[in-house]
């Protein structure tokens, strides 16, 4: 990945540093529990949830840009003061402008995380492999002909077939622009959904709150499986340090 720009923001927090600060101790560290191995250890917030180049986008000239990070910053700069007013200033309910800023902030945190990109990659991977299985060699021959500008040989078709049907040997990963485009399209819609929900704030005097690399948690309705919950079907949305639910 190269660019003529020298000062790209490459160390991208998938959860905002300004949000993580609210969970950090005096040395600006959080305790991170890794689900893959169960190890829990302190981690500086400047490194926590950082993925290199995660939000870089490629423009039409083939250059990489950090414009998405700048756009996220605008939303974060509006959301964090709203959090402080609600939690630290104990202003509740929030006035309309603060509610709108916080709705946009929550919407961004919901769609920007790696889990959303991973889910889209898994769908793209499944669809490609399904297409290969259903359409078979005739489709491979057609694609090769378009790519090569001539009729492919039987050997070329057979080799491509063997590669593409070895499904366990590869995974489809979409271009980062796909996720960034999705964020741009979804944030206004999701923000509107959050704004029109009923909001509660819960205060804990003697217990600490946890957050995650997906800070917006969807709570399923009774009788609904966890893997079937979405924005339209969730009973409520949990975002430390507040709770919202659809106003049904």
Image (cartoon, grey):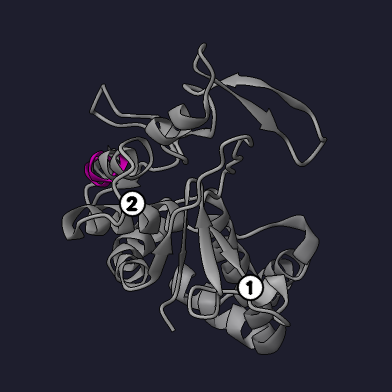
| Residue at 64 percent of width and 78 percent of height | 221
Q: Secondary structure at mark 1?
A: loop
Vertical order, 229 against 240 (above or below):
below
**Quick check: is 79 in the magenta stretch?**
yes
- The magenta span reads 73-80
Residue 24 appears at what percent x and percent y? 52, 24
For the residues bearing labels 2 and 1, Cβ distance under 8 angstroms: no
- Callout 1: few (<14), some (14-19), or many (20+) C-alpha neighbours within 10 Å? some
Does residue 1 appear anywhere in the picture?
A: no
Residue tagged by mark 1? 220
Q: Residue at x 65, y 77 (%)?
A: 228
Residue toward you, 184 or 80:
80
Q: Residue at x 77, y 68 (%)?
A: 162
Is residue 49 in sight in this rendering? Answer: yes
- Judged left or right of residue 193, residue 237 is right
**Image position of 159 (left or right of 22):** right
Q: Quadrant of the C terminus?
A: bottom left
Q: Residue furthest front?
A: 205
Give the x, y percent position of residue 247: 41, 78
- Judging depth in this view, the residue of 115 and 212 nearest the camera is 212
* Residue matched to label 2: 105
Q: Is residue 138 magenta?
A: no
For residue 167, what is the image quadrant? bottom right
Principal SS element in the magenta part? helix
Q: Secondary structure at mark 2?
A: helix
Q: Residues under labels 2 and 1: Cα distance?
A: 22 Å
Q: Is residue 87 above or below residue 198?
A: above
Near mark 2 (Cα within 10 A), the count class, few <14, some 14-19 or many ≥20, is many
Q: Residue furthest right?
A: 37
């Amino acid at each position: 990945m190269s660019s003529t720009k020298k000062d790209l923001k490459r160390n991208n927090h998938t959860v905002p540093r300004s949000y993580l600060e609210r969970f950090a101790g005096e040395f600006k560290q959080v305790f991170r529990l890794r689900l893959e191995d169960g190890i829990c250890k302190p981690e500086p917030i400047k490194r926590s949830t950082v993925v290199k180049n995660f939000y870089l986008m490629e423009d039409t000239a083939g250059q990489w840009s950090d414009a998405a990070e700048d756009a996220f910053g605008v939303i974060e700069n509006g959301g964090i003061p709203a959090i402080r007013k609600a939690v630290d200033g104990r202003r509740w309910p929030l006035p309309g402008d603060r509610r709108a800023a916080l709705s946009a902030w929550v919407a961004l945190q919901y769609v920007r995380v790696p889990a959303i990109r991973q889910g889209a990659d898994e769908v793209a991977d499944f669809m490609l492999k399904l297409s290969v299985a259903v359409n078979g060699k005739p489709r491979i021959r057609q694609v090769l002909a378009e790519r090569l500008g001539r009729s492919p040989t039987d050997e070329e078709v057979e080799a491509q077939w063997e590669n593409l049907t070895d499904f366990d040997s590869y995974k489809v990963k979409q271009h980062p622009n796909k996720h960034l485009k999705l964020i741009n399209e979804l944030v206004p819609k999701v923000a509107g959904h959050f704004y029109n929900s009923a909001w509660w704030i819960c205060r804990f005097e003697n217990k600490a709150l946890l957050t995650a690399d997906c800070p917006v948690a969807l709570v399923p309705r009774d009788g609904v499986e966890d893997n079937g919950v979405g924005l339209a079907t969730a009973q409520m949305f949990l975002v430390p340090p507040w709770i919202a639910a659809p106003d049904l």
